[in-house]
């Protein structure tokens, strides 16, 4: 078994502890990856870190696990939030997955003037982010909030957190010029919907002290591409990619 | 009609010219976006630039177009190539789309030791890249080559082109440290398959003067995420995002 299966659990992990995995996780271990008793897996708990564990019993509906040793300390991702306007289903799944891999700490689904948010399922977003966290070897999970309105979010903003909004109108500075000259690692990135921000939203954003418009080159990026691009650039300058 | 339909044609465009769009394009104009005679569209030809055009006839199998005026000069994307190991179908589609949006000049599907390249359809890649070019408002198309073996590509490499390979083993420098200290805009980025590079491939790459290993942070990125992340970072420093 070259690559150990990696799983998130909401049980607090300490060496020597015995606990049960749930039915869904048991099904996966038994029938999908075909693990058996004595096989080892990796667990993390979004609290104490990552641990090597051993399967002690594999029952019909649950799996008994023993925690053997710590393999990674708990590390929280850099202090970057993502505010994004939900897109069509597949693209939203994609945004959650990629934002998790790219190390965001918090994801805020954001209702804007032109957002199509009729079909938002936060439970689904959470499941996606857990799966992506397992895959990309995070020891924390991103926090995912309920859908909120952009204007409400801005009205309650902590002004010590810089909000970068990606500006398709190209009336803003290149993102690199802004990132080069800031040291504030407490940040958030806002990506509008396919139709962009409304003129009223742009006026509002441009008048806020804590908000900075930024451009990502001359081509028009789809929303999910702008998510990947802006988070990557931020991680390079202010996050844990340097 | 707020947003004009944008279309690539292999006809060379000059003001006053009349030409026919093909059956597929005609079907799309007529039945999908519901355009009619006298409506205007935007065309580009990967040669002379982008032009405003008018529909003069909309027949069963073709559309007669007249070129009215130039709306953008021809611009070629920065001199960045992408070498990537084809993935599962959807993820490969995604890579072609995102690489096109992120402004690569050339895409080289690359066979590596651990690549699953049984089902490569270059025609499909080209169709994807044309659609993405139409969407993101490029005036050029990325060139897409046939599948080639990594070792053959490396044996025939022009050593004045820097090749950045994304190194999951974390034995390389952060990409930002490399980008900060180079001025060579003639570049290529190599992204390995899900299983990574083989030990022999890594040894080969590490011994090449023109190749530089780079890391993209502590989390494990999926191949398609690494494509987006590395191209975005490159465009910021050496491309047209600054």
Image (cartoon, coloured by chain):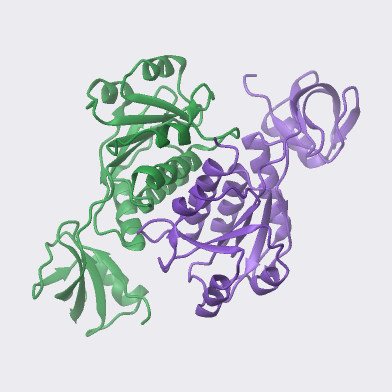
Chain colours: A green, B purple
Q: Position of residue B232 (x, y in %)?
A: 52, 45
The quadrant in which residue A209 appears is: top left
Residue drawn 23% across the image and 52% down it: A76
Q: Which residue: 88% across, 28% down?
A: B14
Task: State the residue in front, B145 or B127.
Answer: B145
Please say if B66 is above or below A184: above
Q: Residue at x 55, y 56 (%)?
A: B90
* Residue B202 seen: yes
- Quadrant of the rendered structure where residue A22 is? bottom left
Which quadrant: the C terminus of chain B?
top right
Q: Residue A188's x, y, as percent?
A: 32, 35
A87 sits left or right of B239 in the view: left
Residue A132, given in percent of the width and then of the height, sits at: 35, 56
Q: Nearer the viewer, residue A222 or A60?
A: A222
Would you place residue B58 above or below residue A121 in this image? above
Examine the rendered structure and indicate whether residue B240 appears above or below residue B35. Answer: below
Depicted A147 relative to depicted B95: above or below: above
- In the image, B152: left or right of A86? right
The residue nearer to you, when weighing A41 against B234, is: B234
- The percent coordinates of residue B30 (x first, y second) are 74, 30
Does A219 sit left or right of A39 as displayed? right
């Amino acid at each position: 078994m070259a690559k150990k299966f990696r799983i998130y659990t909401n049980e607090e992990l300490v060496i020597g502890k015995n606990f049960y995995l749930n039915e869904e996780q048991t099904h996966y271990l038994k029938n999908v990856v075909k693990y058996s008793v004595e096989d080892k897996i990796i667990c993390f708990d979004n609290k104490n870190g990552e641990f090597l564990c051993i399967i002690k019993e594999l029952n019909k509906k649950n799996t008994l696990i023993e925690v053997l040793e710590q393999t990674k300390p708990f590390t929280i991702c850099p202090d970057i939030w993502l505010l994004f306007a939900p897109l069509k289903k597949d693209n939203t799944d994609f945004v959650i997955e990629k934002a998790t891999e790219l190390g965001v700490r918090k994801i805020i689904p954001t209702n804007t003037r032109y957002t199509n948010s009729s079909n938002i399922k936060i439970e689904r977003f959470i499941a996606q982010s857990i799966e992506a966290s397992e895959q990309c070897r995070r020891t924390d999970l991103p926090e995912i909030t309920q859908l909120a309105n952009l204007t409400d979010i801005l009205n309650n903003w902590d002004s010590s957190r810089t909000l970068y909004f990606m500006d398709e109108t190209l009336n803003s500075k290149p993102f690199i010029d802004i990132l080069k000259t800031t040291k504030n690692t407490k940040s958030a990135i806002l990506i509008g919907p396919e139709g962009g921000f409304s003129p009223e939203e742009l006026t509002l954003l441009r008048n806020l002290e804590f908000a900075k418009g930024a451009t990502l080159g001359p081509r028009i990026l789809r929303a999910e591409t702008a998510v990947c691009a802006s988070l990557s650039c931020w991680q390079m300058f202010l996050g844990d990619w340097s």
